Image (cartoon, rainbow, N blue to C red):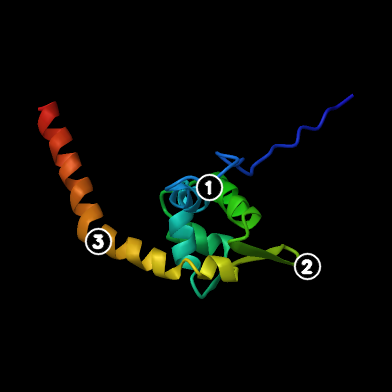
Amino acid sequence: MAHTIQMDTVKKRRYSNYTYDGCPVEASLELMGGKGKGVILYHLQGKTLRFNELKRKLISITPRMLTKQLRELESDGLIIRHVYPEVPPKVEYSMTPEGESLSDVLHALQAWGAKYGIPLLDKREQDLSTREQ
């Protein structure tokens, strides 16, 4: 007799309570954090994209991880997955109003990353390579 195992691909909440000081930050990071979620949301701003279009924009993420992150974002109500009844199936992703409300946050992260994030990471890499020599 064959057994079917259904995998849970949606991450469980880290905490059951987000009422303490600073917890709204933790809750926001829990929803947006994860491998590629911020960049997925960034690319979906005001757009509808298919899976392969997203995959082309996220070169450092595997298709399996992209699928997992899209499912989590959908489950959390930040994106919508629309499946068209075609062969082969056509699937498109877009942001919900809650997802679109992150637009200012995503643009702020982009600006901060360009000004501080990339230089700090470059410095870290230089420091590591200097220590290895």
**Mark 3 Cα shell of 10 Å, populated few (<14), some (14-19), many (≥20):** few
Dot 1 falls on a residue whose secondary structure is loop
Q: Secondary structure at mark 3?
A: helix
Q: On the rendered structure, is 33 left or right of 121?
A: right
Counting from the top left corner in percent of width and height, residue 33 is at: 46, 49
At label 1, which amino acid type do we have? Thr
Dividing the image into 4 quarters, which one contains the C terminus? top left
Task: In the rendered view, tell whether residue 75 sits above or below residue 91.
Answer: above
Residue 86: give x, y in percent of width and height: 76, 67
- Given the current orientation, which residue lies at the most extreme bottom position? 46
Above or below — where is 124 with respect to 96? Answer: above
Q: Nearer the viewer, mark 2 or mark 1?
A: 1
Query: Does 64 sit above or below residue 96?
Result: above
Q: Where does residue 46 sit, x and y in percent of width and height?
A: 51, 75
Q: Are marks 3 and 1 in contact (CB under 8 Å)?
A: no
Distance in Å between CA atoms under marks 3 and 1: 32 Å
Mark-to-mark CA distance, 2 and 1: 43 Å
* Residue positioned most to the top: 1
Which label's residue is closer to the chain start, 3 or 2?
A: 2
Q: Which residue is mark 3?
A: 114
Numbered tag placed on residue 85 in the rendering: 2
